[in-house]
Image (cartoon, rainbow, N blue to C red):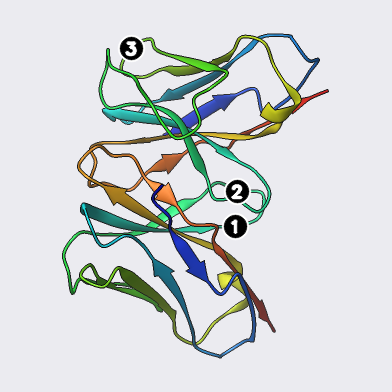
Amino acid sequence: ILNVEQSPQSLHVQEGDSTNFTCSFPSSNFYALHWYRWETAKSPEALFVMTLNGDEKKKGRISATLNTKEGYSYLYIKGSQPEDSATYLCAFGPGNTGKLIFGQGTTLQVKP
Amino acid sequence: NAGVTQTPKFQVLKTGQSMTLQCAQDMNHNSMYWYRQDPGMGLRLIYYSASEGTTDKGEVPNGYNVSRLNKREFSLRLESAAPSQTSVYFCASNKEGIRGYTFGSGTRLTVV
C-alpha cells in the first residue's frame, strides 16, 4: 500500500509569519507530485504539479520544492495572510496513469 | 465555463437503495476520476477513466460501478447502498496524467 504522509496535521500562525509543510511519498515509481489548496465549503484547487527531481515552483507568496530521490516535497508560504487559511493537500502520482494518492492534508489557520 | 459539474449536491439514502452520482466536464479532458473523502482520511480513489471507453478500479471500488458515457460524462452508481458508503464524493478530471485535477463541488451522501 502506497502511503503519502503530510505534516503537521494542523498549524496556527499569526498574520505575517512564514510557514512550511512537508509531504512524504514513496521514492519508487515516481511520476508526479501535486499540491492542492482546499478552502472550507469549496473544492480543492491545483497549486502545483511537479515532475522532476529538484523542481521548484512559485505562485505569488507560495512556493514548493521536490526531492524525488528521498521522497519529500515542501510547501512554503511567505508572510501568511488570513486568506491563506485552508487545507493544503499533496498527492503522489505513481506511474503515468493520472491516478493520485492523496495525503490527509495540513490545515493552516492564519490569525489576523 | 462550468468546469466539473456534479449532481446531486446532497442525498440521503436508505440502506439497500440504489442511486447514480452524475459528473460532467466541459474542458475536453481525457481523464476522469471518482474519489471519496472520509473524516481523518485522505481522498481515496474509487474508480477512474483514463480515456473515453475505459474504466479501471482504484483503491476502494467495492460496492460501486461506473460508466464513462462519453468524453464529458462519468457516472458513479451505488447498487445497494450501505452505511459504510456515507461519505463526500468528488469527481475530478484532467487533460492527461501530468496535469492538475479540476474538482467538482462534491456530493454529500448519507446512508441510513
> Is the C terminus of chain A in the top left, top right, bottom left or bottom right quadrant?
bottom right
Drawn side of residue A51 relative to residue A98, left or right: left
Where A38 falls versus B25 (above or below)? Answer: below
Question: Dot 3: few (<14), some (14–19), or many (≥20) neighbours within 10 Å?
Answer: few
Q: Are marks 1 and 3 on the same chain?
A: no
Where B36 falls versus A76 (above or below)? Answer: above
Circle 3 sits on which residue?
B70
Residue A42: give its label. Answer: 2
Tags 3 and 2 touching, CB below 8 Å: no
Callout 3: chain: B
Is residue B32 visible to us here?
yes
Callout 1: chain: A
What is the distance, in whole Å, between disc 1 and disc 2 at their CAs? 5 Å
What is the distance, in whole Å, between disc 1 and disc 3 at their CAs? 31 Å
Q: What residue sits 37% from the left and 75% below the top?
A: A74
What is the distance, in whole Å, between disc 3 and disc 2 at their CAs? 27 Å
Count all numbered tags in the image, as a single digit: 3
Q: What residue sits 26% from the left and 62% below the top?
A: A27
Badge 2 element: loop
Circle 1 sits on which residue?
A39
Tags 1 and 2 touching, CB below 8 Å: yes
Residue A76 quadrant = bottom left
Callout 2 amino acid: Lys
Callout 1 amino acid: Glu
Residue A32 quadrant = bottom left
Q: Residue A85: x percent and y percent?
A: 61, 70
Q: Residue A71: x percent and y percent?
A: 30, 68
Which of the two residues, A30 or B69, is positioned nearer the viewer here? A30
